[in-house]
Image: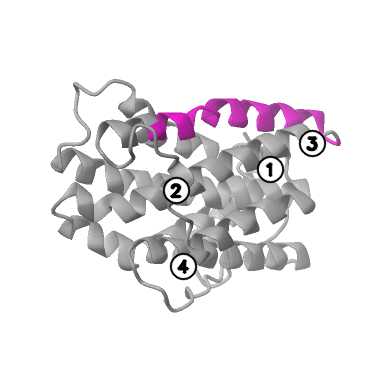
Amino acid sequence: MSKRMEWVVELGRLYGEEIKQGPLFRRLPQVQTKEDLAPLIRQLWWQSDRFIRTLIDRADQCDANVGLKKVFIHHANEERNHPAMLVRWMIKHGFLGAKESPASVKPLNSTLSCIRLNEQLLNQSLDDQVIGLNVLGERLALDFFTAMVPVLKRLGVLDQEDQGEHEYWEVHGEVDGKHLRYGLGHCKAVSPDSAAGRRIQDLLWRYANAYHKMLAGWAGVESVRSLKRVDPQIDARARKVYRRDVTSNALT
């Protein structure tokens, strides 16, 4: 895959670093019991279930670009069973009753806002869908699951004797790093300081804030400050990535 749009990936990573300074990530090391995680887990199901629905809808609706449609179908198929995997894990460890609907706990407003923002992407360009759902959404998923796995192991709800659970929790560390770049090679290469590049910066910041507020809500914090905007013209790492890519003239 061409690295001509790696500056976008770098901005997503930098916003992820900001979000990791937020309430949820600060709270995780302090969690002492699985009951402390119950509200978070119930919200996670909503995000997991609706995210895969959005991925499936995206694949079904993408008829304008054959190459991207294949990418979207592959991505959706890789995640199609994740909500069911999560439900099995929830039941086994007492986060959900055997006959209880995972929807019995309502989503928080911040969770709904993030879900709706993802769904609205399907009315935007294919490039926007890749940047919002893959570059940013999968980046933040990678950060979240990377932080959660050691906490779950410490609490004894994720171990080698569990069947199927590692497919849900630990697989994200393996696949989300790939998923965040899915489709990026099909996106039009733009400079971060062009009109199109600035619009992408706005999209990343807006969506990063939605995830920031959602994750803070999962930690019981209703209001958080907006993330600091990252300017790729000022941030040396993102700017360096872009210049290297342009110089290499790598094409897919």
The reply to whether callout 2 and callout 1 are in contact (CB within 8 Å) is no
Q: Earlier in the sequence, mark 3 or mark 1?
A: 3
For disc 2, the neighbor class at 10 Å (few under 14, some 14 to 19, many from 20) is few
Left or right, 190 with respect to 227, comes to right
Residue highlighted by disc 1:
249
Q: Does residue 189 show up?
A: no
Structural distance between the alpha carbons of marks 2 and 1: 52 Å
Residue highlighted by disc 3:
62
Q: Does the stretch in magenta take in 65? A: yes
Identify which amino acid the numbered label 3 is placed on: Cys
Identify which amino acid the numbered label 1 is placed on: Asn
Residue 213 marker = 4
Q: Earlier in the sequence, mark 4 or mark 1?
A: 4
The part of the chain drawn in magenta is 64-87
Identify which amino acid the numbered label 4 is placed on: Lys
Q: Main secondary structure of the magenta part?
A: helix
Secondary structure beneath dot 2 equals helix
Structural distance between the alpha carbons of marks 2 and 4: 22 Å
Structural distance between the alpha carbons of marks 4 and 1: 38 Å
The reply to whether callout 2 and callout 4 are in contact (CB within 8 Å) is no
Residue nearest the observer in this picture, 73 or 90: 90
Q: Quadrant of the C terminus?
A: top right
Residue nearest the observer in this picture, 150 or 217: 217
Residue 104 marker = 2
Q: Position of residue 164 (x, y in %)?
A: 34, 22
